[in-house]
Image (spheres, rainbow, N blue to C red):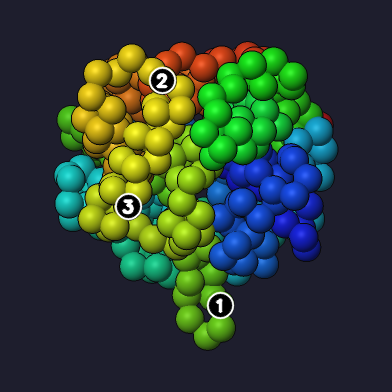
Amino acid sequence: MKHGSGSVYATITTASLAAASVAGMALASGHFISGLQGQYPEYDLNDTYVFQSSNDGYTTIISSANPSTPGSADSPAGVTFGNDGIYNIHIAQDDSFETGMTLAFTFDGDSIQAHKIGSPNADVGETGEALGQGNVGDMLTLSDDIRVWAGRGEEPFFGNGVGLAKFNAAKQGGNFSPEIFQEDGDLFLGATASFIVVDIPNSMLGDVIKVFTTTAVPHKGEWSQVDRHANVLFPYVFLSDTPAVQEDHEQHRPDLDVEERRQAIVNNVFWAVSASKADVGNGVEYAENVADMVMPDVITYRPGSEASYAVDDLNGRALQDDAMNTVLQLMMGVPVDDNANDSHRYTAEFPYILPAK
């Protein structure tokens, strides 16, 4: 998950919540450094899941945004979805992000409009052809038999956000302190977010897909990307030691990741395994292998297979996956338990999200 709180908005979101949960560390969130997530909290992305649907022959993708402060159900934006911008789900079928599609969603009060673009890396602000429309909270069946549900719901992510901020601070000082996580637990009980849940026929997807999400708004006379999300906690684990790179990650696209960010990941992971003294053999080679697993920052999934966001196989991400433990182990080279366990704040059937109370 992602993000944090800033001086203007007391927002804590699933990934930077770590940064926002400890006094003096709020600015570690790339969102509030860049400013756009703080100005447009409705478009502040929170999480991404990709897994085999409960409906046979479909793949589910869940994108969440506009998260409440953990422990509170109140949306910082005061609305479920923003009315001026676009929520995008990008689905690539190749490594160069040239084939695939982008599903784009716009909102007008309680109405949702769905669109499809024949490119997985569509230009910021593009919407494409209309697929259909309906009401927030209703089950919708669109063209191409794509099914959609959108609404406000309970936060399914579980993670020790307070502990992550403390753990990162210790790591930056060269100390490996996993015992820090025993002081706190799941920060997200009682939190809510806004969810777009889609079911896509596997026949539209191919053998392997690479998924990421973005949001965009009209800003200073032009369309601007507000946020981007894929791997859980990506900026706050893998980029936590390089604030300058962390700062602009959300305004970029994954086609530039390997060229512009891979070396930062290698350096950060090598520093982490040096601090943990992990028995990984050659530390540089280990760091390069991890960088190749998480770069570009997308969720890779084989449609029709069981999703598992695990150290030995990042194949999609299911709601029950202990994703924070996974990225911590990848980063540190040894198992790390964040002391937060699945509280099952979701259901087993589409659309999975428990409505906000």
User: Which numbered dot is residue 219?
Assistant: 1
State the SS at label 2: loop
Nearer the N terminus, badge 1 or badge 2? 1
Which amino acid type corresponds to the residue marked 1 in the rendered image?
His
Viewed as shown, does residue 254 lie left or right of 86?
A: left
Where in the figure is residue 191, as x and y percent of width and height? 75, 34
Viewed as shown, does residue 285 lie left or right of 21?
A: left
Mark 1 or 2: the one toward you: 2
Q: Which of the two residues, 13 or 242, is positioned nearer the viewer here? A: 242
Residue at image coords 54%, 39%: 172
Nearer the N terminus, badge 2 or badge 3? 3
Q: Is residue 93 above or below residue 56?
A: below
State the SS at label 3: helix
Instruction: Quickly name the residue at label 2.
Output: 277
Q: Which of the two residues, 174 or 245, is positioned nearer the viewer here? A: 174
Q: Which of the two residues, 215 or 129, is positioned nearer the viewer here? A: 215
Disc 1 to disc 3, C-alpha distance: 26 Å
Name the image quarter holding the N terminus: top right
Which amino acid type corresponds to the residue marked 3 in the rendered image?
Arg
Which amino acid type corresponds to the residue marked 2 in the rendered image?
Lys
Nearer the N terminus, badge 1 or badge 3? 1
Where in the figure is residue 322, as x and y percent of width and height? 52, 19
Instruction: Quickly name the residue at label 3.
Output: 261
Viewed as shown, does residue 127 lie left or right of 162?
A: left
Disc 2 to disc 3, C-alpha distance: 24 Å
Mark 1 or 3: the one toward you: 3
Disc 1 to disc 2, C-alpha distance: 46 Å
Where in the figure is residue 89, as x and y percent of width and height? 41, 48
Dividing the picture into quarters, in which one does residue 38 lie?
bottom right
Viewed as shown, does residue 282 lie left or right of 315?
A: left
User: Which numbered dot is residue 195?
Assistant: none
